[in-house]
Amino acid sequence: MELVKKVVAHFLKDSPVRIANIDRGMQENHPETIFLAAHSLKSASTTVGAMILADMCKELELNARRGLISDVQDQLARIESEYRKVVAALESYINLLGQD
C-alpha cells in the first residue's frame, strides 16, 4: 500500500504544475508547451486510474500536436473540473488506506 500512496502523492504534487503549464502554453500561444504538459498529465492520470481525465488530456494533446489550440481554454476548464473530482476521490482513497 505504501507504493500506492507514493504514486498518488506524486500525482497530487506534480499535476498542478502540469495544469499550470497547459495554461501557460495557452497564454503564450505555444502548442508544444500545451502538448508536453497534456501528454505528461495524460500519463500520470492513467497511472492513477483517472481514465476520464486521461482521455480529456489525450484529446488536448492531439489538438495541440496539430496546432489546433483555439479551444484550449474550454478544454482546460473541463480538465480542471475533472481534476478536482479525481483529487477528491484519490484523497478519500488514501484516507481509507490509512485506516487499515
Image (cartoon, rainbow, N blue to C red):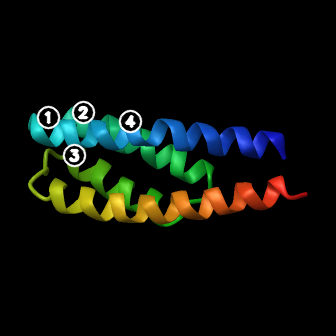
Which of these two is toward me, 18 or 33?
Answer: 18
Q: CA distance from mark 4 to mark 1?
A: 16 Å
Q: Does the CB distance between marks 2 and 1 fall below 8 Å? A: yes
Residue placed under numbered mark 3 in the picture: 64
Chain-order first, disc 4 or disc 2 = 4
Q: What whole-number distance in Å separates the C-alpha atoms at marks 3 and 2?
A: 9 Å
In this view, the mark in front (4 or 2): 4
The residue shown at (52%, 37%) is 13
Q: Amino acid at mark 3?
A: Ala
The mark total stands at: 4
Q: Position of residue 87 (x, y in %)?
A: 53, 57
- Is 90 placed above or below 39 here? below
**Mark closest to the chain's N terminus, 3 or 4:** 4
Please give left or right for residue 16 compared with residue 10 in the image: left
Amino acid carrying label 1: it is His
Answer few, some or many: residues within 10 Å of disc 1's Cα (few below 14, many 20 plus, some between 14 and 19): some
Label 2, on which residue?
Answer: 33
- Which numbered tag is attached to residue 30? 1
Q: Position of residue 1 (x, y in %)?
A: 84, 47
Residue lying at 63% horizontally and 40% vertically, measured from the top left: 9
The residue carrying mark 4 is: 17
Name the residue type under label 2: Thr
